Image (cartoon, helix red, strand yellow):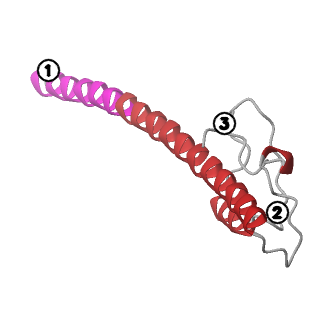
Amino acid sequence: MILDENKSYSTDRRRVGVFDAVSQSDGIEGSGGINQGNIEQADTPGTDVQPGDSSPGKLLGRLELLEKAFYGYVHGHQERLKTRFKESTELEAAFTEELQVIKRGLRDLAHQVEDDPE
């Protein structure tokens, strides 16, 4: 199942309770990636399910809605994690480089002080 990243989805949270619990535990909403948690009922056939309706078509529709919402969230979250990891790796490299420059400068300064006892 492929989600259209440019499409706006809306979710009926009563039907996707698992997704709601997952998104609350993350603490990050609306940043980049797929617009998780916004799936319209019209996007998935058989999603006009009422409580207590257990026909195979309705259950399959509910399952597809749950699947779409869950994977949309998970894949969006994975992309955000990849982006944060790349940013932190780049920041670490820049910090390490600057740290080495400062250490070299301090060593050179220390050697100059030792060599020039006035």
Is the residue marked by circle 1 packed among few (<14), some (14-19), or many (20+) residues within 10 Å?
few
Quick check: 101 left or right of 43? left
Q: Which mark, by number, is residue 47?
A: none
Identified by mark 2, the residue type is Arg
Q: Position of residue 42 (x, y in %)?
A: 85, 46
Q: Quadrant of residue 103?
A: top left
In this rendering, is residue 100 above or below 18? above
Q: Which mark, by number, is residue 13?
A: 2
Which is more N-terminal, label 3 or label 1?
Answer: 3
SS for dot 1: loop
* Quadrant into which the C terminus falls: top left
Residue at the extreme left: 115
| First to last magenta residue range | 95-116
Q: Nearer the viewer, mark 3 or mark 2?
A: 2
Residue 49 in view: yes
Q: Which residue is mark 3?
A: 32
Number of numbered callouts drawn: 3
Residue 118 in view: no
Identified by mark 3, the residue type is Gly
Please report contact status of discs 2 and 1: CB closer than 8 Å, yes or no.
no
Which is more N-terminal, label 2 or label 3?
Answer: 2
Which is more N-terminal, label 1 or label 2?
Answer: 2
Identified by mark 1, the residue type is Asp
Residue in view at x 52 percent, y 46 percent: 78
* Quadrant into which the N terminus falls: top right
Separation of marks 3 and 2 at Cα, in angstroms: 21 Å
Q: Which residue is mark 1?
A: 116
Q: Position of residue 67 (x, y in %)?
A: 64, 56
